[in-house]
Amino acid sequence: MTIPKGWVSIEVKELEDLPCLRFAEKPDRRSSWRLLKEKVVDAGICSHCGTCTICPVDLIILEDRPLDFDPKKGCMGCGVCVAVCPRYNYVPLNGPGEYTEALAGRSKRFAGQDGAMVSEFMAAALEMRLIDVALFVARDEFFRPFVVHVRSADELLDRKVTGTKYSFASVMPELHRIIKRGDRIGFVGTPCMISGLRKVQNKIPLYKKNVPLAVALFCTENFYWHQLYEFLKERGADLREAEKTDITKGNFIVTFRDGSEFSIPVKEMEEIVPEGCHVCQDFSGVEADVSIGSVGSDPGFSTVLIRTPVAKKILDFMLKKDYIETGKAKMKIVQKLCDYKIKIHPYPPKGESEESS
Ligand SMILES: Cc1cc2nc3c(=O)[nH]c(=O)nc-3n(C[C@H](O)[C@H](O)[C@H](O)COP(=O)(O)OP(=O)(O)OC[C@H]3O[C@@H](n4cnc5c(N)ncnc54)[C@H](O)[C@@H]3O)c2cc1C
Ligand code: SF4
Ligand code: SF4
Ligand code: SF4
C-alpha cells in the first residue's frame, strides 16, 4: 500500500489489543489515549518521559504534574501515543547493559555536574559535524528546568546550561517540535527518555535519521520541580540561592552561592518521588549510545560507558584533540547501583504480582 505524503507508517505488531489502526489516515474514535490513561498513567507506571506528546492533536498534556489528557482536542484514534510509549506493555530494562568500553573522564574545557563529559560529548559531536544541534536542559533562577538548543561549544561555558537539574524536563516535546527541520540532533536524557526515544525511532524512521546520538544520564529518581522546590523550602533550603544540586552517597545536597550546604537523606524524600520512578530499574540507560553518570568515578570525573560505534568515534576524537583526561571506572560500584535499583523498584510492584498470581 502507498502511504500518502506526510503520513507515517507505524508497526503495531506488539499492540494487538490496540483499537488503533496500522495507518493514521483511518480514524478510529475509540480513542487510544484512554489506553495510556488506564494502563500507564492510572496504573502508576508513567515515567513522565513525554514521548507520547507526539500526539498530532496535542491532546496529551505534559506539565509539572502527572500526565493529563484533554479529550476536547478530538482524538483521531491513530494510536501513535500508545505505539511510542515505553511503559505500555512495560518490561523493565536493567543492569549496566552491553558496553564496549568503560572509563572515567573529565573535560579540560567545560565545568559540569561531575566531569562535564556529557557537555564534552555534545561539543565534540558538534565539532565533528555529526550533529547540528544538541538539546540541553538549562535552569532559570528558581532552578526550574527548561530546554535549550546548543549549536556551539561556547554555549556550554554557561554553568546554567551544564549540570544536573533534578526535575522532569520537556526534552521530548521539544524533539517532536523540531524533528522535521532536518537538523541532526544530539539528545541527552534520563534512561526513561532514552527508552522513549528508541521506541519512537523504531516506529518512525525520521527520528532514527535525525537523532544520531543519544546520551543517557545514570538515574535513580527524579522529581516534579514544584514539589522539589516546596519540599526544600519547607526545610529552609531556597533553590533561588542555589549554585548546584547533587545526589551523593544517598543524600540530596544543595550547595548555595555563599558556599554553604544543605543536605537531606534521599530516603526522607520518598513522599515526593513520582510513582513512575518506583517501577524503574534502568539505572544506566542501557539503550543509549553512551551512558554517563557520577557513580563509579572519583569526584570531578564522570563514568562513561561506550555502547555504540558513534560514541566510540566521538571518544577517539576527544582523546586525539586532548580535550579530556581519563582514568579507570569502578564498574563494581556501577553494578551495585544497578542491582540496588532492581531491589528497591520491583516490577510488578510487591503485592501486585502475588495478587495477580
Ligand atoms: C534526574 C537525574 C538523576 C540522576 N541520578 C544519578 C544517580 O543516581 N547516580 C549517578 O551516578 N548519576 C546520576 N545522574 C547523572 C549525574 O547527575 C550527571 O548528570 C552525570 O554524571 C553527567 O555529569 P557531567 O558533568 O558529565 O554532565 P554535564 O556536562 O554537566 O551535562 C549535564 C547534562 O545533563 C542534562 N540534564 C540536566 N538535567 C536534566 C534533566 N532533568 N533531564 C534531562 N537532562 C538533564 C543537561 O542537558 C546536560 O546535557 C542523574 C541525572 C539526572 C538528570
Ligand atoms: S496520538 Fe493523539 S490522536 Fe492519536 S490516538 Fe493518541 S491521543 Fe488520539
Ligand atoms: S511513559 Fe512516557 S510515553 Fe508513556 S504515558 Fe508516560 S509520558 Fe507518555
Ligand atoms: S528513575 Fe529516572 S529513568 Fe527511571 S523513570 Fe524516574 S526519571 Fe526516568
Image (cartoon, grey):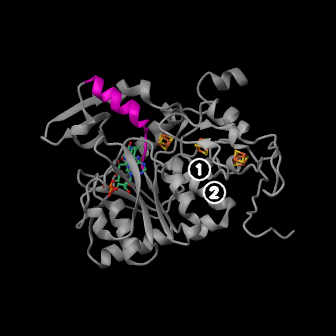
The residue under the point 34% across, 27% down is 231
Outermost residue, right side: 1
Picture layout, residue 80 above or below residue 103: above
Q: Is mark 1 within 8 Å of ligand 3?
A: yes
Pinpoint residue 230: horizontal percent, then vertical percent: 34, 28
Q: Look at the image and tell me in which quarter the C terminus lies.
A: top right
State the residue position of label 1: 51
Q: Looking at the image, do the residues carrying marks 2 and 1 touch, with CB atoms under 8 Å apart? A: yes
What's drawn in magenta, residue-wise?
Answer: 218-235
Give the left or right position of residue 26, taking residue 348 as reference.
right
Residue under circle 2?
200
| Residue 229 highlighted magenta (yes or no) | yes
Mark 2 and mark 1 lie on one chain; the one further toward the N terminus is 1
Identity, as a three-letter code, of the amino acid under mark 1: Thr
Residue at point 55% right, 59% down? 177
**How many angstroms separate mark 2 from mark 1 (CA)?**
8 Å
Instruction: Assess disc 2: are there few (<14), some (14-19) or many (≥20) residues with their C-alpha within 10 Å of its C-alpha.
Output: many
Which amino acid type is marked by label 2? Val
Q: Is residue 286 visible?
A: no
The x and y percentages for residue 272 are 43, 28
